[in-house]
Amino acid sequence: MARVVLEGIRKTYPNGFKAIHGVDVEIEEGEFLVLVGPSGCGKSTLLRMIAGLESITEGRLSIGGRDVNNLEPSERDIAMVFQNYALYPHMSVYKNMAYGLKIMGLPKAEIEERVKKAAAILELTDEQLTRKPRQLSGGQRQRVAMGRAIVREPSVFLFDEPLSNLDAKLRVQMRLEIKTLQANLGITSVYVTHDQVEAMTLGHRLMVLNAGNVEQLGTPIELYQRPASLFVAGFIGSPAMNFADAKIDAEGKNITISGQEALPLGDGGMPEHGGKDVILGIRPEHLELVVEAPDAVPMTVTMVEQLGADTLVHGHFGESRSDLTVRLDGIRHIKGGEVLPIRVAPDHLHVFDPKTERRLS
Amino acid sequence: MIENRPLLTIFSHIMLILGVAVIALPIWIMFVAASHPEIRMTQVPLPMLPGGHFFENLDIALSRGMSGMDGNGVGYMMLNSLAMAMMIAVGKIAISLLSAFAIVYFRFPFRMFFFWMIFITLMLPVEVRILPTYEVVANLGMLDTYWGLSIPLIASATATFMFRQVFLTIPDELLEAARIDGAGPMRFFWDILIPMSRTNIAALFVILFIYGWNQYLWPLLITSETSMYTIVMGIKQMLEAAEQVPQWNIIMMTALLAMLPPVCVVIFMQSLFVKGLTETEK
Amino acid sequence: MLKNVHFGPSVLPFLLVLPQIIVTLVFFIWPASQALYQSLLLEDAFGLKTEFVWFRNFEDLLSDPLYWDSFKITIVFSFLVAFLSMSFALILALFADRVIKGSGAYRTLLIWPYAVAPVTAGALWVFMFNPTLGIVSYALSALGYEWNHQLNGGEAMALVVMASAWKQVAYNFLFFLAGLQSIPKSLIEAAAIDGAGPMRRTIDIVLPLLSPTTFFLLVINIVYAFFETFGVIHVVTAGGPAGATNILVYKVFNDGFVGLDLGGSAAQSVILMIMVIALTVVQFKYVEKRVDY
């Protein structure tokens, strides 16, 4: 267990491409930090820099109080689980797990003890330990890859999209297993994924990366409730947040979408931004169908998706051309062309600056 | 097949059997000749069916050879061929594995220069540089040695290319995992790359063993002592003697012995052989 | 070419390529450059002094009708070997692709001559066609044809072609069969539904789709006939009678080692080198586009 501290970490490739523009974060002992973002955002690069598989162009990286910038991966007291597991195909499961320990020069008895212990944690049978990786199912390979990390008894676990090669059902199951395992072992972990559900469920904190920049760092709930930027707002949450061009009135009390309906801004409004053109974000689950209310806005339905547990209603406010999605509980009998009265909860409005794309409220 | 035409299938089998017969005929004639006594080999027409002197001829070939030769038989020639073939095959594989490893897994100055230098060997078969190569080997005092027989032939662009290809298909993550496990370059080479290239190495070995065993021009140039002759050279030597003493039974027995090891390799390691042939041509 | 993930800088890679580079330098590059250099020298009859003569050796060579004869013989020989072994192999491969049962067994029975040394192959054929004793020449004379490749240049050529082609059938068969088996079955089935019979399908569909393999094999066979048939020639005809089978590679050996004409032999080596380079370029340019279907 160790604190991992990143200070001003930057990465520039020899060809001049800047992959990471400066990351500062202190990962606490036992914390589970998830790096999340679309492909190419630099999240894997950052993880590989922590692992020592990529060099650090600028900045300081310390693990457990030790500067590790110039240490080999094997000297950093870390273990890594790869996307494609990277199991040695010619070695048995046992040998795969024991290989690093053998190189460390541990006595045979201790290697065996550690491997057996890890196998027990991961519920790998003795018979499975003698098999070759190709004789295992995807989920079992995943476990072996984690086993290889566990036996090292590292201070830090690094996960590079470890679940992306599994089918949907197995992914949910393994996600829970990883979460439980990390909670039980209490080892500081850094986990890379592009899947926001995985990120939300696993991480104590999430770091959202976009094009090599940190968009936001915070707990899943913080990111959900107060996304710091348009990018985070659009990335976290499913179905994605609705966005519309809007204008705040002169007093900063109300907000108007495309010159149509005025919505009240809660909490005393935003007088400092009075008269400003903004982007308004509303999550589909924060739009509700009301019977008849003074602040209801009529929405014209274009399409309905029945998911069973929820119903997703697509449409637009009045003549506005901004599409929006409403998420309603349970099964609703709604048809295209209907006009529904929709109410927006004022505390759930997200207002963004169209130029900086940062949060205003 | 697409449509059921039994006649066409039967015809195909007949043609194939005829083809096999044409290909096998020289071998059959060789085998028959190797099983008759010397005296029968001077009577026209020669026999088409095997005789009863096969093992007698085998004994003569191995222990004495043809009359008029040094009387040491051809056994030692087979050992020379074996030594040469093994040294060539192992040597080519070893130096090619190392250089392919360097070229694929390291960034270092002159990397591409070395790569092209190895590539050029492809364009310089021994046949086109006979005399100067002979001079080099003579100056190094390697005439009539196993080293002289094998080392000048072990540079190999084909083998280097093949291993390069194999290494390129090995996922990068394995190297990363090995680095996290603390394996250095040579450890990675031995523990991961070599075991993962096992079948390719075996396939290449089959091809190179045949290549080495069948070398003729090169040993012909650099050996003058009969104790260094290879079995393939022994055949030529016997054929020259045959102008005077036509001991065709012994010559054919020798030819049989000369082709036996490589043919056995092809037949018993057929899948490796096919893999080796197709991969080295990529 | 280079892995994205690789080891850091050290002297290790130099040590790793060193053995191959030393062998290449000492036994390939140096002798080849010597050949280039010697091809520009003329040695007097007693080997006492050498003179730098620029391209005189090449001029002499190219104005020597014997050299041009050897050139023509090599071309004829190569194309005959390539044609004979490829067509024989193709026919067998077409039949083997047709039969389902036993195609593996036929393959085994057909591929082993690959392992026979050229010298051994030459010995077998020279024995079968021995003018006084050979079984085939006996059969021919029973039919009224007196075979003697030791006297008749055409027969000598036929014999070395047969011996060389016999050995190469295995290789061609293997690649033709692999090429045939990689043609998608659906194409053949589509042609069958279009009403094409087996013969028509072979001509209209199979052979065109096989053309990359055919071209590849043509290059390989020519290289084989040029450079790897030395043993066959040496054993069967020794270039004779009267130079009728004196292919270029044999002539280099003969002029250099037996005739001791260093400059002339070196000039021949250089010309051969140029031909190998040309063939290699053709082969490599082509190999890139090899997978065509």
Image (cartoon, coloured by chain):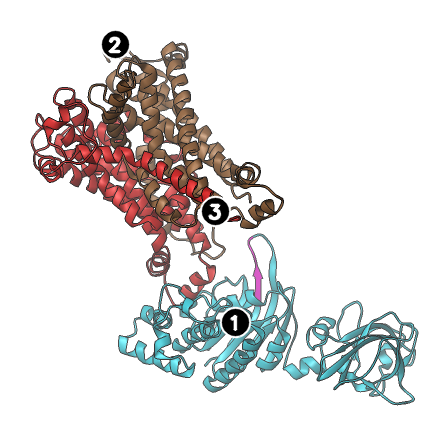
Rendered view: C2 above or below C42: below
The amino acid beneath tag 2 is Ala
Give the quarter of the figure containing the C terminus of chain A.
bottom right
Residue B74 location, x and y as percent? 13, 35
Single out the mark in the foreground, 2 or 3.
3
Residue B209 vs residue C91: left or right? left
The residue that mark 3 highlights is: C181
| Residue A240 is at least partly visible in this image | yes
Residue at (75% x, 86% y) in the render: A329
Looking at the rendered structure, whether the residues under marks 3 and 1 are on a common chain is answered as no
Examine the structure image and report whether residue C141 is included in the region drawn in magenta.
no
Measured in 3D between alpha carbons, the distance from the residue under mark 2 to the one under mark 1, in whole angstroms, is 78 Å
Bounds of the magenta segment? A9-14
On what subunit does the disc labeled 1 rest? A
Measured in 3D between alpha carbons, the distance from the residue under mark 2 to the one under mark 3, in whole angstroms, is 60 Å
Residue at (28% x, 14% y) in the render: C241
The red-coloured chain is labelled: B
The cyan-coloured chain is labelled: A
Rendered view: B173 above or below B276: below
Residue at (35% x, 57% y) in the render: B189
- Residue B79 sits in quarter: top left
The residue that mark 1 highlights is: A162
Q: Colour of chain C?
A: brown
The residue that mark 2 highlights is: C45
Residue at (39% x, 10% y) in the render: C65
Residue C170 vs residue A187: left or right? left
